[in-house]
Amino acid sequence: MVKYIIKRLLGMILILLATSLIIFTILYFTPGDPARTIAGATATAEDVENMRHIMGLDKSYIEQLGDFLYSTFIKFDLGDSWVYNKPVINEMMIRLPRTLFIGLSAMALNLFLGIVMGIFAATHEGKWQDSLTMGFAMVFISCPDFWVALMMILLFSATLNLLPAYGIGGIQYYIMPIICSALGGIAVNARQTRASILGVFREDYITTAKAKGQKENIIVWGHMLPNALMPIITSIGNGFAKIVAGTPVIESVFSIPGLGLYMLTAINSRDYPVVRACVLFFAFFTAISMLLVDLAYAFVDPRIRARYQTVKKKETK
């Protein structure tokens, strides 16, 4: 298992290198001049040229790419923001806790509610409870995050005056962003859990447990759910990566100064060091999420653990 984790971590380095190359190339060939944008509309041609020199844009593609890769992967320096003239890593560390708090809270919410709704629908297959639950799930999936966020602001802030519409402060500022981030995941997890539970509903060991007179809760939570977890874990891993990477929309609507809004602002102002750093972080976070999903497979399924142990024994011989 340890050797497998090391291999995955080494593969993660290749993923980050490929991501760095792709995002740098895309930004390099994007039409427009970042120096002109940052210097301002009233800047002279000489001012713009000086700005290009300061930003290193007067170098060739290969030189700029080499400098970027060397600074990022050798010096572990993400550079300075062209707009704010501050180290990008410092700003990211300030904003990261807000993004992670929203993402982790939303993940916990959609994990709990999604699994409960999926089990409820599966145990009432074909009944009105099943149709109602899956109907809610379909609505959650269909509604865009930004639209839900705006509707919640109109209802809970403008009309009922219960929650703040934007900004940061106490926990009340995060309630609507967390709910908006979680709705899509709740729907996906509910549908996946329902399908997984129904997949094991008529297995022989479930029939045997029912014949022995075990309570329904024990059958569902003790027998069905553990054997239906594999597809659910995959859905959870993908949803977790999407929640954190999808925060730009939520943070933009609610004006939360997290990584998502930081990257979105940087894109609009052509602050390329910030864009590159945020994209790398999201790629790293997604790779870590997929690694945790694979480890969760081994934890849940004894067959996968046995496979790792068999490989280890062969290597020892």
Image (spheres, rainbow, N blue to C red):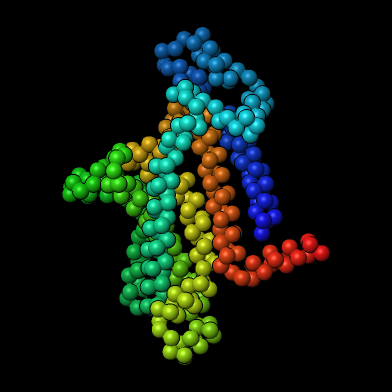
Screen quadrant of the N terminus: bottom right
Vertical relation: 117 (above or below) 286: below
Please tell me which residue is depicted at 42% across the width and 61% down the height of the picture: 111
Vertical relation: 114 (above or below) 238: below
- Is 82 placed left or right of 144 in the picture? right
- Is 54 placed left or right of 39 in the picture? right
Residue at far right of view: 317
Give coordinates of residue 159: x percent, y percent.
18, 47
Vertical relation: 156 (above or below) 257: below
Query: In this rendering, does residue 187 appear at all?
Result: no
Please tell me which residue is depicted at 48% across the width and 50% down the height of the picture: 242
Residue at far left of view: 160
Which image quadrant for residue 132? bottom left
Please tell me which residue is depicted at 59% across the width and 59% down the height of the picture: 294
The one nearer the camera, 137 or 80, is 80
Give coordinates of residue 283: x percent, y percent.
55, 44
Vertical relation: 204 (above or below) 67: below
Please tell me which residue is depicted at 43% across the width and 35% down the height of the picture: 94
Residue at far front of view: 316
Screen quadrant of the C terminus: bottom right
Query: In this rendering, does residue 241 appear at all?
Result: yes
Give coordinates of residue 206: x percent, y percent.
50, 83
The one nearer the camera, 182 or 41, is 182
User: How many numbered circles are shown?
Assistant: 0
The one nearer the camera, 289 or 49, is 289
- Is 288 placed left or right of 245 in the picture? right
Give coordinates of residue 115: x percent, y percent.
42, 66
